[in-house]
Image (cartoon, rainbow, N blue to C red):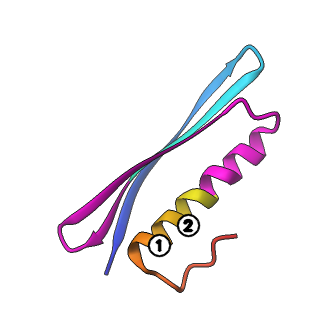
Amino acid sequence: QSSMMHKVGWLSPFYDERCVNEIGLIEAAPNHWYAITILARYGNDYEVEEQLVEHASCVVFKAIAADTSLDCK
């Protein structure tokens, strides 16, 4: 069974921008890990940025882990 570890981070607004970041390790097969970083910046809507990073993370995990049970909305 595949698994993942991740860390989400937010940076306070710098002028009119915000940054949403996610760094993750995905176990694609036993003892074979895939590392990914997803960064979102300059969005006008912080909630939309957060949803984008969450969705991208889910899609990548679903593809790498071949987990068809996930519903990445």
* Figure check: 72 above or below 57: below
Magenta segment? 25-54
Q: Which mark is residue 59?
A: 2
CB-based contact (under 8 Å), mark 1 and mark 2: yes
Locate the N terminus by quadrant.
bottom left
* Figure check: 61 above or below 44: below
Q: Is residue 43 left or right of residue 3?
A: right
Q: Amino acid at mark 2?
A: Val
Mark 1 lies on residue? 63
Q: Is residue 26 left or right of residue 42?
A: left
Q: Is residue 21 left or right of residue 65?
A: right
Say which residue appears at 59% left-offset and 58% top-offset: 56
* Figure check: 15 above or below 21: above
Q: Amino acid at mark 1?
A: Ala
Q: Residue furthest left?
A: 31
Q: Position of residue 62 (x, y in %)?
A: 49, 73
Name the secondary structure under disc 2. Answer: helix
Say which residue appears at 46% left-offset and 81% top-offset: 67
Q: Position of residue 10 (x, y in %)?
A: 59, 34
Marks 1 and 2 sit apart, C-alpha to C-alpha, by 6 Å
Q: Residue furthest bottom?
A: 69
